[in-house]
Amino acid sequence: IKLGLFWDEWARCLGSRYQGDHLYRTGRFDSCARQWKDLKTATQARFLVGRDPQTARRLLESTYYKKRTTISPTAGAIWEMKERPGWD
């Protein structure tokens, strides 16, 4: 399990460029709580992978990063996914 990926995501979130973009788009700063939670979850999964690989895999599948990048790298960051496709 590569913790560097989750560390990079958390560091990117804390960066001034990302925070400026987020402030411009939403009117508030991002707390980066989701990325911090992902980093903690990945750390927990890394310690579990030797004893219980399936639990470690489930933990990684539950991360915000995995959910966000599985759908689209820009879903939730630039646009919101619709339940039903259409122009409405």
Image: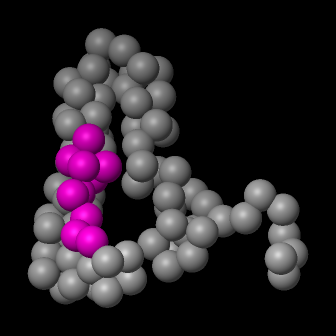
Q: Is residue 44 above or below residue 22?
A: above
Residue 18 appears in the rendering = no
Q: Residue at x 41, y 54 (%)?
A: 65
**Front in this rendered view, residue 47 or 38:** 38
Quarter holding the C terminus is bottom right
Residue 16 position within the rendered picture, expressed as x and y whole percent measured from the top left: 13, 81
* Residue range of the region highlighted in magenta in the rendering: 28-37
Residue 69 located left or right of residue 39: right
Residue 70 quadrant: bottom right
Q: Residue at x 61, y 61 (%)?
A: 71
- Residue 75 at what x, y percent from top left? 55, 69
User: Considering depth in this image, is 56 or 33 the residue closer to the camera?
Assistant: 33
45 or 30: nearer the viewer: 30
Q: What count of labels does the image hold?
A: 0
Q: Is residue 28 left or right of residue 7?
A: right
Q: Position of residue 82 (x, y in %)?
A: 73, 64
